[in-house]
Image (cartoon, rainbow, N blue to C red):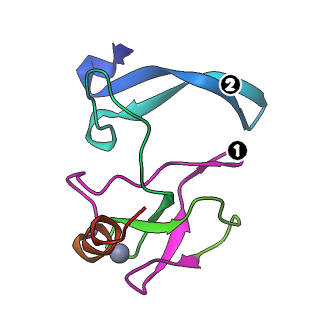
Amino acid sequence: MWLLRGGSYALVELEEKVRAAGGWVGRLSFHLDDLNIRVNAQPPREPYGTGLGPDRRGHAITARPPPRPVPALCGVMANPLLIGDWCLPFAADMTRTCGECARIVTSTPV
Ligand SMILES: [Zn+2]
């Protein structure tokens, strides 16, 4: 991971390439507020993707959503955060995560 733009963005090398505009990419830049940085992190256990709701919060949606608004676990319509056909995994403990979606995901057995 490399910091960009005065340390507010990170260039992240992905474990596998994803299809994006212009072809397959192995690195993407993210705002640091949208990353959950951990040492020796395990893959997300929650089988959900992230959708951006009208409240600008991250909501839990199906992991392989179509490229249009879909209902989140809490009931709001959310736009999938897609990079090519890959959806950003939902993380229940992010600053801008929907509290209701986080509650539902963390109380549901895997
Ligand atoms: Zn929600």
Label 2: how many Cα within 10 Å (few below 14, some 14–19, many 20+): some
Hey, which quadrant is residue 69 in on the image?
bottom right
Residues shaded magenta: 70-98
Q: Residue at x 58, y 77 (%)?
A: 70
Residue that mark 2 sits on:
25
Mark 2 vs mark 1, CA separation in Å:
10 Å
Determine if the magenta segment contains residue 79: yes
**Residue 50 x/y as whole percent:** 46, 59
Instruction: Describe residue 109's horizontal placement relative to residue 12 as left or right.
Output: left
Q: Residue at x 37, y 23 (%)?
A: 10
Q: Is residue 34 above or below residue 66?
A: above
- Tell me the element at label 2: strand
Residue that mark 1 sits on:
84
Q: Earlier in the sequence, mark 2 or mark 1?
A: 2
In the rendered view of the protein, which quadrant contains the C terminus?
bottom left
**Residue 47 x/y as whole percent:** 50, 57
**Residue 23 x/y as whole percent:** 79, 29
**Residue 60 x/y as whole percent:** 43, 67
Determine if the magenta segment contains residue 66: no
Hey, which quadrant is residue 106 in on the image?
bottom left
Amino acid of disc 2: Val
Q: Residue at x 43, y 56 (%)?
A: 46
- Magenta-colored segment: predominant secondary structure: loop
Residue extending farthest bottom: 75
